[in-house]
Image (tube, rainbow, N blue to C red):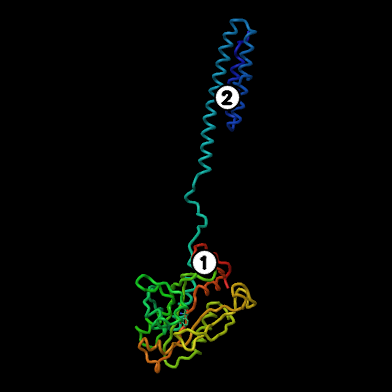
Amino acid sequence: MMDGAADLDGRVIEVQAEALACVDLGALEELRLRWLGKKGEITGLLKSLGALPAEERARRGAAINALRDSATAAWESRKGELERKAEDAALDAGWIDVTAPSGARPAGRLHPITLLLEEVIDHFTGLGFEVATGPEIEDEFHNFDALNIPKDHPARDVWDTFYTDRREIPRTHTSSVQIRAMQTRKPPIRVISPGRVFRNETIDATHHASFNQVEGLLVDRHVTIAHLKHTLETLVAKLMGRKVETRFRPAFYPFVEPGLDLDVQCVFCAGVGCSICKGSGWIELIPGGLVHPKVLDACGLDPDQWQGFAFGMGFDRMVMMRYGIDDIRRLYDGRLQLVRQF
Ligand code: DAH
């Protein structure tokens, strides 16, 4: 007679093979329900025991229990394996390959003011000018008196001047460095002097309380306005990278005689008129003139022997035109975006 439990040996092998064939935890759970669940195979086998004679029932019962233990062991061992596999996959997903080439990194750039200043310095040093600097906190003599702007003279009101408690002046212009250059050098003198200046201005798109100027000064014999005109025209063409329309207008500055303003045609609207040039088609760019005899005199130079030209450009405006920045505050607020380059 057939052994009452022989068929179950085959089932042990069956459940073990099925467990190994499960490739993920979902499939393994299905296996558990199918074999070990309340309505599963083993429960079915146990239910069929009741119909058997007592002696056979005990033997087959023990065999079914053995099958259940084998099925549970197969399930548990495969579960452990699949869980480790899942963990490994998660680790793999987060794995950092230190030998992989890195992606692009955001890099710092030079500020447009620095970039353009380098060009200006390059241009002028090529013409034999040297770079001169002066203190940002000035005295009244260098900022005003020696520049033929006497105390109590209304001309002083033009510069919205800050004063410290000790009546020192955060310099209102780089013209103060002209004076220092003439005091410390013997002609012929050729200097440019870039630097920060300070004015008590309400800040808006075209005004700032702190901005940059580049001063220029040349002292020699027989200097005329033609030298200044040529110098400025070449400078503007160089900085704009092309020839732009310019015009000169007479203007008054106490430290030059005659004085003039150089305007360039607005690069934002090509002279048609826009909000940046306030509808005029021109942008006032560089004031200058021939150094006033009183200024030469105040610096100990004989005006009968020496003449000079000077200019002082608002450098921020130049940078804005060159790089298409339409708000001066952008130059200083750390959110600079270059819109276009002319
Ligand atoms: N210092 C003047 C200003 O800030 C600009 C200026 C005008 C400078 C004429 C010059 C000059 O050297 O000749 O308003």
Label ID, residue 276: none
Q: What's the amino acid at mark 2?
A: Gln
Q: Quadrant of residue 138?
A: bottom left
Relative side of 137 to 60, left or right = left
Relative side of 39 to 151, left or right = right
Q: How many marks?
A: 2
- Say which label, 1 or 2, has the lower sequence index: 2
Quadrant for the C terminus in the image: bottom right
Residue, x 50% and y 69% (percent of image)? Answer: 202
Residue, x 42% and y 92% (percent of image)? Answer: 221
Q: Are marks 1 and 2 in contact (CB under 8 Å)?
A: no
**Residue marked by disc 2:** 16
Instruction: Depth check: give the residue in front, 22 or 127.
Output: 127
**Residue marked by disc 1:** 329
Q: What's the amino acid at mark 1?
A: Arg
- Image height of 257 relative to 237, above or below: below
- The single residue placed furthest to the front in the displayed view is 152
